């Protein structure tokens, strides 16, 4: 069973903001002759790397709600110029929308089990993905979606 990470998507006000950032990072990688992926640098290095890389994703919290995920492709530990250990989370190029799931603010990342992870939007039933974003948000907050 896959294990996931969850993290606040600081600086993004919407899934479109996240998609734009991911697209820019992918284009930069392609221009440098690399695979079209994005990455995110964290301070803490996950200890459960094998579980994370066995189908895990990074779930993004945007505006107090889990709204999207990206597949975890790799974890790279390194030391920055200040001598601090860091971890690069290598992420897939696709931003996958999920059902809304409220989350309070927290620092860093947290592990997220498969059973606690929100479903992908495409798996929530016919027509759900066609609902306007704000309506989906309101329905989720009311517990109706």
Image (cartoon, rainbow, N blue to C red):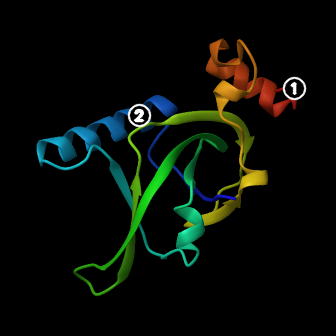
Q: Give the crowd class for mark 1: few <14, some 14-19, many >=20 residues within 10 Å.
A: few
Cβ atoms under marks 1 and 2 closer than 8 Å: no
Q: Give the crowd class for mark 2: few <14, some 14-19, many >=20 residues within 10 Å.
A: some
Where does residue 115 sit, x and y in percent of width and height? 78, 52
* Relative side of 115 to 51, left or right: right
Q: Residue at 49% of width from left, 48% of height from top?
A: 71
Q: Nearer the viewer, residue 131 or 4?
A: 4
Q: Residue at 40% of width from left, 72% of height from top?
A: 87
Where does residue 145 sit, x and y in percent of width and height? 82, 27
Where does residue 36 sit, x and y in percent of width and height? 27, 43
Would you say residue 107 is visible in this rendering?
Answer: no
User: Farthest right residue?
Assistant: 143
* Relative side of 87 to 125, left or right: left
Q: In terms of image quadrants, where is residue 31?
A: top left
Q: Residue at 71% of width from left, 50% of height from top?
A: 103
User: Farthest left residue?
Assistant: 32
The tag on residue 80 is none
Where does residue 85 sit, x and y in percent of width and height? 37, 82
Q: Nearer the viewer, residue 102 or 128?
A: 128
Q: Which residue is mark 2?
A: 19
User: Farthest bottom residue?
Assistant: 83
- Is 139 drawn above or below residue 118 in the view shown? above
Location of the N terminus (image quadrant): bottom right
Label whose residue precedes the other's in the sequence (1 or 2): 2
Gap in angstroms between the C-alphas marked 1 and 2: 27 Å
Q: Which residue is mark 1?
A: 144
Q: Secondary structure at mark 2?
A: helix
Q: In terms of image quadrants, where is residue 30?
A: top left
Would you say residue 144 is visible in this rendering?
Answer: yes
Q: Secondary structure at mark 1?
A: loop
Q: Residue at 56% of width from left, 54% of height from top?
A: 55
């Amino acid at each position: 069973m896959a294990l996931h990470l969850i993290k606040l998507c600081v600086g993004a006000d919407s899934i479109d903001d996240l998609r734009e950032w991911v697209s820019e990072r992918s284009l930069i990688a392609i221009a440098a002759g690399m695979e079209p992926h994005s990455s995110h640098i964290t301070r803490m290095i996950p200890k459960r790397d094998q579980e994370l890389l066995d189908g895990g994703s990074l779930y993004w919290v945007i505006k107090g709600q889990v709204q999207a995920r990206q597949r975890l492709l790799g974890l790279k530990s390194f030391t920055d110029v200040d001598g601090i250990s860091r971890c690069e989370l290598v992420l897939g190029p696709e931003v996958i929308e999920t059902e809304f799931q409220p989350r309070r603010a927290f620092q860093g990342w947290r592990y997220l089990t498969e059973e606690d992870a929100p479903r992908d939007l495409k798996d929530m039933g016919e027509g759900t993905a066609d609902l306007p974003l704000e309506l989906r948000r309101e329905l989720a907050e009311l517990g109706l979606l």
